[in-house]
Amino acid sequence: MLPFKSIQEAEIAIGRSLTTVETIWFNYSVNKSDYYLYCHNILFLFLIFSCVPLYYLFLELFFKKSIQSYKIQPKVSLSLSDVFRCYKSVMRMFILVVGPLQLVSYPSVKMIGIRTSLPLPSLWEILLQLGTYFIVEDYFNYWIHRFLHCKWGYEKIHKVHHEYTAPIGYAAPYAHWLEILILGIPSFMGPAIAPGHMITFWLWIALRQIEAIETHSGYDLPWTVTKYIPFYGGPDYHDYHHYVGGQSQSNFASVFTYCDYIYGTDKGYRYQKKVLQQLKGASNANGEQNGGSATFAKDDLSPRSSKAL
């Protein structure tokens, strides 16, 4: 709850007039408790889990031929009933684990210093903090994910998430309840190191889940803005990890590729890409020499076409 009773009082306290966005924030949050504002995450996560994967489902249903060449594992196709079954499982876990976790985790958010007061952070402050959150979460998530691929971690916990060897958007949060709790820790590490405003925290939680849905979408779409982010893994990178499955000791990183590169856990993926590039180069050369065009089936460009290392 804001410590001001009027806009005039807020302007006197911060020493300037409120911006338009700050005025909107004041009018919305002035009579709401910090706990109530924090619990908005529950609504945001529900909408993200429910609506964002619909984008990929819509493309698959109505533009299947147009986007088929971008499907990473084209021979795998789930029915609508399979997709809905996955969504029901995710929602069940949301009601039983994710929602209650949000309700009881407020004291930790308060303790690390997430604020709701005015002034609002600048755009640059938000971007710098979000960048920090993504990098910190990616590093800690890498090691937890790597632990989950040891024999005990995989058999007891992580194999639930790997039931989808060809992931779909709705399968991004599909996991064992303990994995959901464990992977919640890296998500709080960034805000704990660089605490910011509640709006920044909302954006962080939302963007991280949207990113996870994209990397599990099963489509490497060329028009996504994430392709312009340096060291970003993306759907093709994470799809390889799912394809290899429980034996995978590659591509553990959740967002970026730097941890896998530094610790040598992307060698299988990089070897595969190198081989495929050589095959494509030989194909193009053969096509030119014969005055025609040599092409490969999409399967030749998927993890299915090479031995997992």
Image: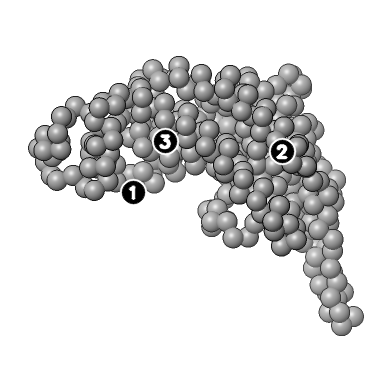
Q: Of circles 2 and 1, which is in front? A: 2
In the displayed structure, 100 sits above or below 114; it is above
- Residue sticking out furthest to the bottom: 291
For label 3, the SS is helix
Which residue in the protein does label 3 denote?
202
Q: In the rendered image, which quarter contains the C terminus? A: top right
**As rendered, which of 287 and 67 lies closer to the eye?**
67
Between the residue at mark 2 and the residue at mark 3, the CA separation in whole angstroms equals: 27 Å
**As rendered, which of 47 and 172 lies closer to the eye?**
47
| Residue type, mark 1 in image | Trp
> Could you tell which of marks 2 and 3 lies nearer the N-terminus?
2
Q: Horizontal placement of 91 versus 65: left or right? A: left
- Residue 56 lies, in percent from the top left, at 65, 49
| Residue type, mark 2 in image | Val
Q: Of circles 3 and 1, which is in front? A: 3
User: What residue is rendered at 65% in x and 38% in y?
Assistant: 170
User: What residue is rendered at 65% in x and 56% in y?
Assistant: 221
Which residue in the protein does label 1 denote?
124
Task: Check disc 3: other Cα within 10 Å, few if <14, some if 14-19, many if 20+.
Answer: some
Please identify the quarter of the rendering in which residue 138 is found.
Answer: top right
| Residue 54 in sight here | yes
Q: Horizontal placement of 102 versus 255: left or right? A: left
Q: How many marks?
A: 3
In the displayed structure, 49 sits above or below 113; it is below
- Residue sticking out furthest to the right: 290
In the displayed structure, 250 sits above or below 114; it is below
Which residue in the protein does label 2 denote?
83
> Could you tell which of marks 2 and 1 lies nearer the N-terminus?
2
User: What residue is rendered at 24% in x and 37% in y?
Assistant: 27
In the displayed structure, 257 sits above or below 202; it is below
- Residue 260 lies, in percent from the top left, at 64, 41
> Could you tell which of marks 3 and 1 lies nearer the N-terminus?
1
